[in-house]
Image (cartoon, rainbow, N blue to C red):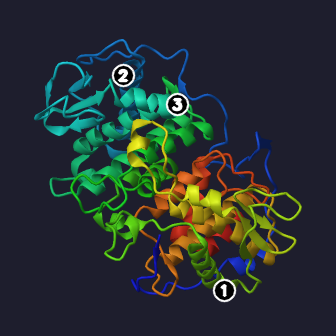
Amino acid sequence: MNLTGGRGARRGVLIAGIVTVASLLAAACGQETTGQLQTAGDIAGLPVTHFESGLKPNAPKPDLTVENASNTEADQLATAAIADVSAYWAQELPQHFGEEFEPVAKLLSYDPNEPEIEVCGATTADAAMNAFYCPPEDLVAWDRGLLLPLLRERFGPMAIVTVLGHEFGHAIQFRLGDKAGIDESTSTIVKEQQADCFTGSYFRWIAENRSEYFSVSTSEGLNQVLASMFFIRDDAGQSASEQGAHGTAFDRTYAFQLGFEQGAKECAGINQQNVDERITEEAFHSDDIGSGDIAIDENSIDLLQRSLDQAFSGAGVDAPQIVDEGGTCGDGSGTPPATYCEDNNTVSIDLEELAVIGQPVDREAEFQGTESAGGLGDFAAFSEIASRYTQGIQKGVGASLDNSNAGLRTSCLVGAWAGVIKDEGNNPLVLSSGDLDEAIAELLQPRSLLSADVKGRPVASGFARVESLRLGYFDGSSACTQNYG
C-alpha cells in the first residue's frame, strides 16, 4: 500500500448495499468441515465436492508421441494432460467455433540439466523452469526436470494440468486466428488472459466429470489450481503493456474463473479494450514507498482506521475502533491476529504478529520452494484487519456474522474497500501494484481471515473466496449484499 499521493479522482464512500443488509435474511450456513464453512449454494452452478483430485485410476494410456519423454511421473501427468485437453478441444471447437480440431504437430519433454536441445530458436537450457507453445513449429514443450516436479510437489498433480492446459490454449489461439481476435499485433497480455480463460473452460469440463483422464473437486482441487496460478503470476511493479506480461494473480484468476463460469466462447471475446478496462497489473507509481509496502506499525494502523472510517462513513453505524490488545477479546475469545469483539465494538489486533504477516513477499524463496523470511505483504495484513472491521459494520446494520454468507460478504466488502482506495486521492491509503495479489495470497491460506466469519471459520472454497473479493472490487458493496445477503 501507499500513503495518499493525490492520484486519481474520488470514487465515493461505501454506502450502497451495506445499509440494506438489515432488511435481508442471511442464507443458512452449510455443513462445517474441519473448521471451515461450506460455501453457500454452489461453485458456478456445480455442487461443492470434496475428494482427492488428479489422474483417474482407470485413465487410459495416452496414444501420443512425445519427443525425449521419460518414465517420470511428471511426464506421465503431462502426456495425459495433453491427451485430455486435446479431447476437450476436439469437442469444443466444432460445437462452438465451427472448426475441426487439429492436434499439435510436436510435443517435447526436456530436462534443462541434460544435454541441450535446439527448440524454437533457443535451447532447452534457456527454457529452464518453463513450458511454452511455439507457433512456427506448432510445438508444446515442458520442463520435466525442474518446473513440473516443483508444481507437483507444491500444488498437486492438477497444477501440471493447469500449466499445460494454458499452453495448449495458445495452440488454440493459433488455430482460431480471427475467431479469437488474435493476430501478430495482439498484445501479450491479451493472449495470456485468453489462454488463462481457455484453461478455466477446460477445467469446467473436468469438474463436470467429462474427462477420461482427470477428476477435480470444486473445493480443494480448484483451490490447488488457483494456488498454482498465483505462483506463476508476474512480479509486482510490472506493467501489463510490457512484452511478455502474463498478469497479476488477481488478473489471472479472473480470466480462469471467467472461462470456468462462462465457457470458451466468452474467452474468445477477450480483447485489448475489455482487458484494459479491468487489468490491475501496472508499474509502481513514482511516489510509492518501499516498492508498495509500508511497515505495519502504530502509524499505519492509524491510517488504516481513518481509511476504513472514511470508506464506510455512509453506513450510518458506529465504526469499530482498532485497538492493539493482543488479537483477542477481553474474555480470551477471538480469531488472532485480528478479532472483532462484539461486546465493545472493537477490532483487537496483535500488532507484532500482523507486522510479520505484513513483511514483503520473498519472491525468490517462494519460487524455489524454500522457507521464506518474508510475509504475505502489507495489504494481506491490512485486509485481515479490514475483514474484522467490516464485521462491525455488518453487525451495525443487522447482518448475521456466523455463517458462510458472512465470510463471503466480508471478503467482498474488503474488495469493495480496495476498489474505493484505488486511485483515491482523498483517502489516507492508496493501493499499490501487487496489493491485490497479497489479498489473493491471504485468501488462499487455509487459515484465511479475510473470508472468515466472526468465529474465524473460512469458507472452504478458494474459488468462492477469490470470486467474492473480485466482485466487491469491481462492483462495489451493493453487489456484496445482493450476492451474499
Q: Residue 79, labelled with which disc?
A: 2
The picture places residue 74, in percent across and down from the top left corner, at 40, 22
Q: Is residue 73 above or below residue 285?
A: above
Q: Is residue 212 above or below residue 203?
A: above
Mark closest to the chain's N terminus, 2 or 1: 2
Q: Secondary structure at mark 2?
A: helix
Mark closest to the chain's N terminus, 1 or 3: 3
Near mark 3 (Cα within 10 A), the count class, few <14, some 14-19 or many ≥20, is some
Near mark 2 (Cα within 10 A), the count class, few <14, some 14-19 or many ≥20, is many
Asked whether residue 278 appears in the rendered view, the answer is no
Q: Nearer the viewer, mark 2 or mark 3?
A: 2
| Residue occupied by mark 1 | 313
Q: Residue 210, labelled with which disc?
A: 3
Front-lying residue, 206 or 402: 402
Q: Secondary structure at mark 1?
A: helix
Quarter holding residue 298: bottom right
Residue type at the position of mark 3: Arg
Residue type at the position of mark 2: Thr
Q: How many marks?
A: 3
Mark closest to the chain's N terminus, 2 or 3: 2
The outermost residue toward the left is 121
In the rendered structure, the answer to whether residue 28 lies left or right of residue 319 reads right
In the rendered structure, the answer to whether residue 42 lies left or right of residue 439 reads right
In the rendered structure, the answer to whether residue 98 lies left or right of residue 91 reads left
Front-lying residue, 63 or 6: 6
In the rendered structure, the answer to whether residue 150 lies left or right of residue 348 reads left
